[in-house]
Amino acid sequence: MDLHNTCESVCAALFGKGEVCSRNELKELLGIGDADLDGALDRLVGTGILIAISGGDKGGVDALSFAPNLALAGVSIDQNDIGAELWFPASRIRHRRSVVASDSDPVPPAIALLREILKSAPDTKVASLGVAFPGLIDTTNGHVQVSTHFPEFNDRPLANEFVEALGCESPVLVERSAVCDMTHALLFSGRELGDALLVSLKTDLSAAALLDGAILYEKSGKLSELGHLKILGGDIPCVCGGTGCVETVVGRLAWEREYGRLRRSANGLPSSLDEALERGVAEAETLVLESFEALMPILECATTILAPEQMLISSDLPADIAEKAAAFLLGKLQSATFGASVRDVIPLNATSTVDGAADIGACWLAGNPQYSGKDPGAAAGSGPWR
Ligand SMILES: [Zn+2]
């Protein structure tokens, strides 16, 4: 038994559970005996990540819990907003702040937000930092390889920028926003997720997959750049420089563009798409719902290869529209031969779930050594960043 690996598994199991975990539950989860578990736990208690509480080993409730001042930090960067978060697993308290993204570099405001939250919790020890970012990422070093929506980040060492600016010794993980959304769904959707495909329709159109309950680590970029599959024909220009991309027809940018066109041809429509959807303007709803048809070609590819049982749609649409879109897609998939595996389409939308889905997902991934490959225990004693 490799003690270091055991520690990592204990960490992973606990971060996954969030609050407390009984010894028996842990042993079962990890498939290890008492002696190995004790060794692993000693080390975690030594780092300050865990405090052992309650009970004896003879019949009592022998429970473990996180150190109360230990936090996981998360940041999400999107075209629309930037969010930062401290999550204390022991108490499940979350501190979150966000700002509307401006055109300038999103990294300085993200760092400023983190510093601001840390000031309000001065004794915090930050175990790890996760960063959710739209693009293709090398998660081994936090290097952004390609980001269609943030071309200035192409080939940029994003994790290092956070490490240098914060002077942090804690491990930093950068992961695709869709993967972080998927992690949030795993933790908080209240559903048992096994084989699932998540399609994120925020500013960029991207996807993430779950195989047998585990996040698919995908190096090729096919899921991250799903929105840029050129399969629709047509001549609508895309942010990637091409035409015919799925993203030019379905998703936030396409909806905004089409709504602008609609407003120019009809009088009295609300000034923004969001307002029109909130007020239930039929033309705006139709525009959004009909665009979901454009997802079918990419779903054909993805569902044929991955055969997901569940599909998750992550969007910032109002709950009722998100429900209608999910019902539409389920109907389409069940009548198509390739979509036979999909039994459920679940809408995950910003208005019905907590804010900061991607931040919390990034928090969890960075704090989970099995995923990040980095041990947050090593840095947990280092205190807040400068
Ligand atoms: Zn494109």
Image: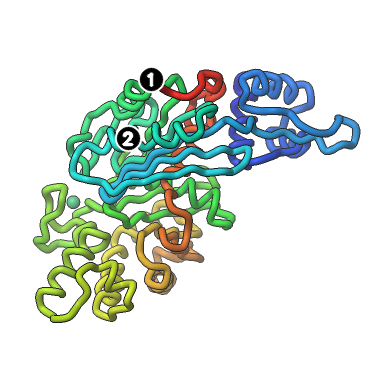
Q: Which residue is drawn at 11% across and 48% down?
A: 241
Viewport quadrant of the N terminus: top right
Instruction: Tell me: residue 199, above or below residue 264.
Output: above
Q: Earlier in the sequence, mark 1 or mark 2?
A: 2
Q: Label 1 vs label 2: CA separation?
A: 22 Å
Residue 357 drawn at (x, y percent): 44, 49
Task: Check disc 1: other Cα within 10 Å, few if <14, some if 14-19, many if 20+.
Answer: few
Q: Provide the secondary structure element on which disc 2 rests.
A: strand
Task: Check disc 2: other Cα within 10 Å, few if <14, some if 14-19, many if 20+.
Answer: many
Q: In this view, does 343 lie to the left or right of 82?
A: right
Location of residue 137 by image quarter: top left
Q: Residue at x 51, y 18 (%)?
A: 382
Label 1 CB sits under 8 Å from any ligand 1 atom: no
Residue 340 drawn at (x, y percent): 46, 66
Q: Which residue is drawn at 59% across and 34% down?
A: 12
Q: Provide the secondary structure element on which disc 1 rests.
A: loop
Instruction: Tell me: residue 46, above or below residue 293.
Output: above
Viewport quadrant of the C terminus: top left
Is residue 2 visible in the rendered image? The answer is no
Q: What residue type is labelled 1?
A: Gly
Residue carrying label 1 = 167
91 or 21: nearer the viewer? 91
Residue 43 drawn at (x, y percent): 66, 19
Q: Tell me the mark number nearer the camera, choosing from 1 and 2.
A: 1
Q: Which residue is drawn at 64% across and 30% down?
A: 67
- Badge number at residue 137: 2
Q: In this view, does 384 lie to the left or right of 271?
A: right
Q: What residue type is labelled 2?
A: Ile
Residue 187 drawn at (x, y percent): 55, 48
